[in-house]
Amino acid sequence: MILVNTDFITGKELETISIVKGSTIHSKHIGKDILSGFKTIVGGELKAYTEMMEEARAIATKRMVQEAEKLGADAVINVRYATSAVMQGAAEVIVYGTAVKFK
């Protein structure tokens, strides 16, 4: 599956199928949340949250690709990511794009 954040794929003629998306909501367990709280006092990267967001993006992307595959897509164009806080320590990641077939 080809994923691009442009509205074209060089050398390919595309037929639009549908919008596709994937999402997940992730949080860290309370121990890592407390340790991250201490880290905010001194500053620096909150590695537990960085890892959480990387994992969440990977899961959301996989779900989007699975949806596109079910529709028979060859690629997803205009891929975009968005995040939002659902509650303290938990975030939703959504990825969406346009599923296309090659002509």
Image (cartoon, rainbow, N blue to C red):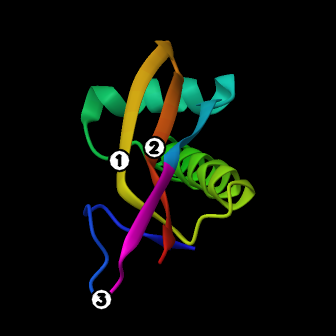
The mark closer to the camera, 2 or 3, is: 3
Disc 2 target residue: 96
Q: Residue 11: which numbered mark, if any?
A: 3
Pointers 1 and 3 in contact (C-beta within 8 Å):
no
1 shown above or below 44: below
**Residue displayed at 29% across by 26% down:** 41
Residue 80 is marked as 1
Q: Residues within 10 Å of mark 3 (few under 14, many from 20)?
A: few
Q: Please provide the residue range marked out in magenta.
A: 11-17
Identify which amino acid the numbered label 3 is placed on.
Gly
Q: Position of residue 98 (x, y in %)?
A: 43, 51
Q: Are marks 2 and 1 in contact (CB under 8 Å)?
A: yes
**Earlier sequence position, callout 2 versus callout 3:** 3
Q: Which is nearer the N-term, disc 1 or disc 3?
A: 3
- Count all numbered tags in the image, as a single digit: 3
In this picture, residue 44 sits left or right of residue 53: left
Residue at mark 2 to residue at mark 3: CA–CA distance: 23 Å
Q: Outermost residue toward the right?
A: 70
How far, Cα to Cα, is label 1 from label 3?
22 Å
Residue 60 located left or right of residue 39: right
Residue at figure coordinates x 40%, y 42% from the top left: 46
Foreground label between 1 and 3:
3
Indicate whether residue 63 is drawn in magenta: no
Q: Nearer the viewer, residue 78 or 50?
A: 78
Q: Is residue 41 left or right of residue 85?
A: left
Quarter of the figure with the N terminus: bottom right
For disc 2, the neighbor class at 10 Å (few under 14, some 14 to 19, many from 20) is many
Vertical order, 9 against 40 (above or below): below
Task: Give the mark nearest the N terminus, 2 or 1.
Answer: 1
